[in-house]
């Protein structure tokens, strides 16, 4: 009969490595357990909570992991559990019947547990417990990091969006605003500097109007509107000038008529004076 060598059992090796890991003070409260319903070693006996986990794995063979929070000895722990199944027939040499098991295994653990296992049966849940405060602290750190990254990306996106907005929207709107400003000014369009400014702004507006996007369409509509307004402004100015010229002309005629009447009256007074002197 073969001899039982614990070091050949993967779960035993994992536990021994984990125990060395726990020798460090900061990891003393980390726990590893092969929570088994029918264990060979009594220390692997599943408690009520762990039994529920094993039963969940048995009820749903597609379930590969469970995790959450559990309170043990007045401390909240975060756990991760995975199913442990008998996948090799060689395992049944030690766990089928006490008669087939190695003698040194019987001497060490007895015949009360760890027998009657079946191939492909889920017999335990491999569970790691971690203090919840460590998990929450890591979560807070990750959250802060994620928020910082998000804020950085958001700020960069705003900066890029602001630049694109200025270049594609605000800058093309400036010529329209300046043309509208020139149209609203009361300066005479006959002034060379005013005419030159208007010509420059219309040229800039022409460049935008050539675009095939919405801004180009808006510029073309605004361009037509500006030309209509400018044309009507010119017409109104011309009509006003004609009216002023007519008023001046009529005023000049009135002044000439008034001067002529004054001359006639003066001549009449002179004649009356002359005749009055002759009679004497």
Image (cartoon, grey):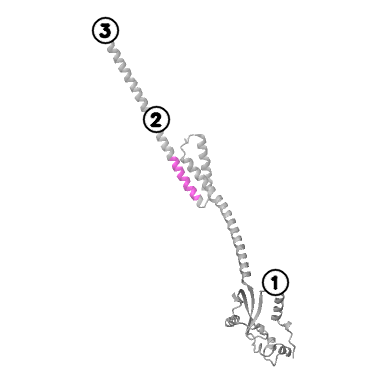
Q: To which residue does mark 1 refer?
A: 25
Which residue is at the front of the view, 157 or 36? 36
Residue 245 shows which numbered tag?
Answer: 2
Magenta stretch: includes residue 226: yes
Residue 33: where, in percent of width, then height?
Answer: 66, 79
Mark 2 vs mark 3, foreground winner is 3
Q: To which residue does mark 3 refer?
A: 278
Residue 14: where, in percent of width, then height?
Answer: 70, 78
Which residue lies at the image location 61% right of the left edge and 82% below the top edge?
A: 47
Tell me the SS state at disc 3.
helix
Pointer 3 local density, CA inside 10 Å: few below 14, some 14–19, many at least 20 = few
- Tell me which label, 3 or 1, sits earlier in the chain: 1
- Tell me which label, 1 or 2, sits earlier in the chain: 1
- Tell me which label, 2 or 3, sits earlier in the chain: 2
Where 223 falls versus 28 (above or below)?
above
Mark 3 vs mark 1, foreground winner is 1
Quote the CA–CA distance across marks 2 and 3.
49 Å
Magenta stretch: includes residue 210: no
């Amino acid at each position: 009969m073969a001899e039982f060598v614990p070091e050949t059992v993967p779960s035993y090796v994992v536990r021994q490595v984990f125990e060395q890991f726990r020798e460090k003070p900061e990891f003393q409260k980390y726990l590893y357990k092969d929570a088994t319903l029918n264990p060979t070693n009594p220390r692997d006996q599943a408690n009520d909570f762990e039994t529920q986990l094993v039963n969940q794995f048995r009820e749903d063979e597609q379930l590969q992991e469970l995790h959450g929070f559990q309170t043990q000895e007045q401390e909240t722990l975060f756990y991760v559990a995975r199913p442990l199944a008998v996948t090799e027939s060689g395992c049944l040499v030690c766990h089928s019947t006490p008669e087939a098991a190695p003698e040194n295994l019987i001497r060490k653990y007895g015949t009360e547990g760890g027998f009657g296992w079946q191939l492909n049966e889920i017999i335990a849940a491999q569970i790691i417990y971690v203090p919840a405060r460590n998990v929450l602290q890591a979560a807070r750190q990750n959250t802060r990091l994620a928020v910082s990254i998000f804020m950085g990306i958001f700020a960069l996106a705003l900066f890029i969006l602001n630049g694109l907005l200025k270049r594609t929207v605000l800058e093309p709107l400036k010529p329209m605003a300046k043309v509208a400003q020139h149209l609203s000014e009361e300066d005479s369009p006959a002034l060379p500097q005013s005419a030159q400014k208007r010509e420059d702004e219309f040229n800039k507006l022409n460049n935008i109007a050539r675009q095939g996007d919405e801004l180009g369409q808006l510029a073309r509509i605004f361009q037509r509107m500006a030309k209509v307004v400018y044309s009507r402004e010119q017409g109104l100015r011309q009509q006003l000038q004609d009216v002023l010229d007519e008023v001046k002309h009529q005023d000049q005629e009135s002044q000439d008529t008034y001067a002529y009447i004054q001359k006639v009256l003066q001549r009449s007074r002179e004649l009356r004076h002359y005749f009055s002197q002759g009679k004497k």
